[in-house]
Image (spheres, helix red, strand yellow):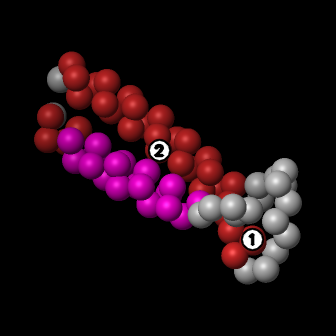
């Protein structure tokens, strides 16, 4: 059981790193291709999907960290 949890923990850690790096800096993915750089634009499409996936992945990372303390 411990090996399974550590494997999932490692996969999730790599996913968190990749998702954070995929978000980019500044105005988002649209600005990389010449889009507008408005400060308060809404997230749409792939940008929103990566944002939500990052939140879920970080929450899973937190839960797995706590579970690994007690297993």
Residue under the point 46% across and 40% down: 58
Residue 30: mark in rendering: 1
Residue 10, placed above or below residue 21: above
Q: Nearer the viewer, mark 1 or mark 2?
A: 1
**In the rendered view, does 61 fall on the left or right side of 2?**
right
SS at mark 1 in the image: helix
Q: Is residue 69 left or right of residue 60?
A: left
Tell me the CA gap for discs 1 and 2. Answer: 23 Å
SS for tag 2? Answer: helix
> For residue 35, which quarter of the picture?
bottom right
The answer to if 37 sits in the magenta stretch is no
Q: Few, some or many C-alpha atoms within 10 Å of disc 2 (few <14, some 14-19, many ≥20)? A: some
Disc 1 crowd, CA 10 A, few/some/many (<14, 14-19, 20+): some
Specify the segment rendered in magenta. Answer: 6-23
Residue 67 image position (x, y, % from top left): 28, 25
For the N terminus, the image quarter is top left
| Image position of 16 with respect to 35: above or below | above
Indicate yes or no whether the magenta region holds residue 15: yes
Which residue lies most toward the top here?
A: 70
Q: Which mark is residue 57?
A: 2
State whether residue 20 is above or below residue 32. above
* Label located before the other in sequence (1 or 2): 1
**Where does the C terminus fall, quadrant-wise?**
top left
């Amino acid at each position: 059981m411990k090996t399974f949890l550590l494997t999932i923990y490692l996969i999730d850690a790599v996913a968190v790193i990749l998702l954070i790096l995929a978000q980019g800096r500044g105005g988002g993915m649209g600005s990389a291709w010449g889009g507008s750089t408005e400060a308060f634009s809404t997230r749409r499409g792939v940008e929103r999907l990566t944002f939500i996936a990052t939140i879920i992945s970080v929450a899973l990372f937190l839960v797995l960290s706590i579970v690994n303390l007690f297993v």
